[in-house]
Amino acid sequence: MTIRTATCFAALLAGGAPLWGQDRFAAMDSAVQAALARGGVPGAALVVVRGDQVVHVRGFGRADDTGRPVTADTPFYLGSTTKSFTALAVLQLVQAHQVDLDAPVQRYLPWFTLADSAVSRAITVRQLLLHRGGVPGRAGEYFLSDEDTSAAAAERHVRWLAGAKPVSGFSYSNLSYTALGLIVEAASGMPYAAYLRTHVFEPLGMRHTHTERADAERDGLAQGYSVVLGRPVAYRQPADRGDLAAGYLMSSAGDIGQYLIAQVSGGRVPGHPGLSPAVVREMHQSRGPIVPDRDISFGFSITTLDSVRILDISGSVPAYLSRFVIAPDSGVGVALLANANSVMADFYVMEAALNAARMALGKRAVPVEAPLVLVVPVVVILGLPVAQLATAWWTARRLRVLGTRRAGLWAAVNAAWGLLVLLGAPFLFQTYWPTMRAYQPGLTWALIVSGWFALVWAVVRTFLATRRRAPASA
């Protein structure tokens, strides 16, 4: 399948005119392309479905540094949109009476535990699906830059939870879905990857969806990029097999179109077996609120877009982004896949997907501009090392004027800032330094340089102040 700007206009009005016209898609493509440029994203792919047809699929930009164009068949890492496939697999096993949603996780994984064994015994499959199983969100960040590709990686990740203190209420955690992938294996007797191929990919006709990076690379996997100071820098995405079920499937826009068709058409996919309508309905039901105006379901969140009820899920791994927006009552689904990540790339890709969904629903796109609450912290963090260097140069020239007491005070301030950054930043962002470096290398290195510079300058400043005081004391 090559890049195409308009496909499959099977749904016609009685008079023979196409239900959707080229103008709408041209405007949609223009809006998406502008957002990608603002985010520094080299390549992306968009797919739109209506009912049981893909009505539009389009590649944008380049798949790698050779200039190879993105096509409808170019695979991308999906990130957390993978979780909807894992939820689907669990619900299929529920329908087959191989999994009980309200059974304890330990029925399928007897070794599963958090730091509190009593709480762990009560955690159910349903609670993991809804991120209400007590698994801490930060714990799910620990392995996101892991390169372990062994078959034992997923169990190793989940066993690490034995040292994690349970939390209460809703807590989004990748390790909840890594555990669900292991439950799929335990209940079905098949490896997670084999189960998805047999029960999801093949019934949907998904021929460019992969669980192994080597397979995806042979199929033309898009090169991933980190966007640093507005410029994309090639980055080799860690092949985290352990968290496959939480965020590491690879797929193409064309294949995701097949998945979206099943979601908006009650499981039916023309020319393919499709999915169980009952399982699809289960995925679309609200299971309670998580924040105002947003509920959770199995594999998705539920909200509204310009008063239209939608299922929404986004994905982010260090060098790729994705978002699925599904309006089941309107029979419309949209997905956008991108081969870059950064704070700004994330913002513009996610907003571009929403605007594409608005236009697919016959609404107007809204202006997309990164808010100051996002821009200002980025500028401040990137500017910290420069500001510190300038301040150090100015201070070094004025140590005699400032005096020993003030020099000592500012040395203490620098030491405090360095410790706060180096020890506190991972807790502030609820993650770990290796994960921060993988996802946001520019911002993370700016923080690391700022922290260490502050500590070193505190020592140097104290030393210089002491040396200047010594002759006066003599």
Image: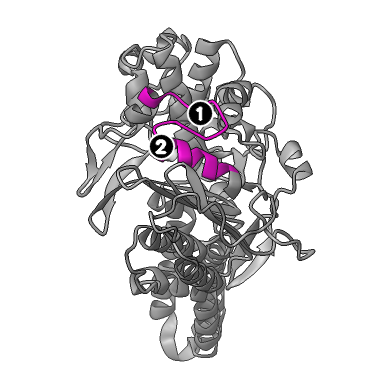
Q: CB atoms at circles 1 and 2 under 8 Å apart? A: yes
- 379 drawn magenta: no
Left or right relative to 134: residue 375? right
- Quarter the C terminus occupies: bottom right
Q: What colouring does the structure picture have?
A: one colour
Note whether 167 is above or below 366 in the view shown: above
In this rendered view, identify the residue nearer to me: 159 or 326: 326
Q: Residue at x 61, y 46 (%)?
A: 252
For the record, the magenta segment spans: 255-278
Residue 140 seen: no
Residue 292, how many percent across, how many down?
20, 49
Give the residue drawn at x 34%, y 42%.
328
From this view, report whether residue 354 is shown above or below residue 147. Answer: below
- Where residue 342 appears, as percent x and y from the top left, is 53, 61
Residue bearing mark 2: 265
Q: Which quadrant of the figure has residue 306?
A: bottom left
Residue type beneath disc 1: Gly
- Mark 2 lies on a secondary structure that is loop
Residue sitting nearer the eye, 152 or 282: 282
Q: Which mark is residue 274?
A: 1
- Magenta span includes 260: yes
Mark 1 residue crowding within 10 angstroms, few (<14) / some (14–19) / many (20+): many
Q: Where is residue 320 in the image (x, y as percent from the top left)?
A: 58, 53
* Circle 1: element type: loop
Residue furthest out toward the front: 15
- Residue 469: image tag: none
Which amino acid, by three-letter code, is at mark 2? Ser
Measured from the top left, where is residue 337 in percent x and y? 55, 53
Identify the residue at image location x=55%, y=16%. Answer: 185
Residue 223 visible? The answer is yes
C-alpha span from label 1 to label 2: 10 Å
Residue at 71 percent of width and 48 percent of height: 221
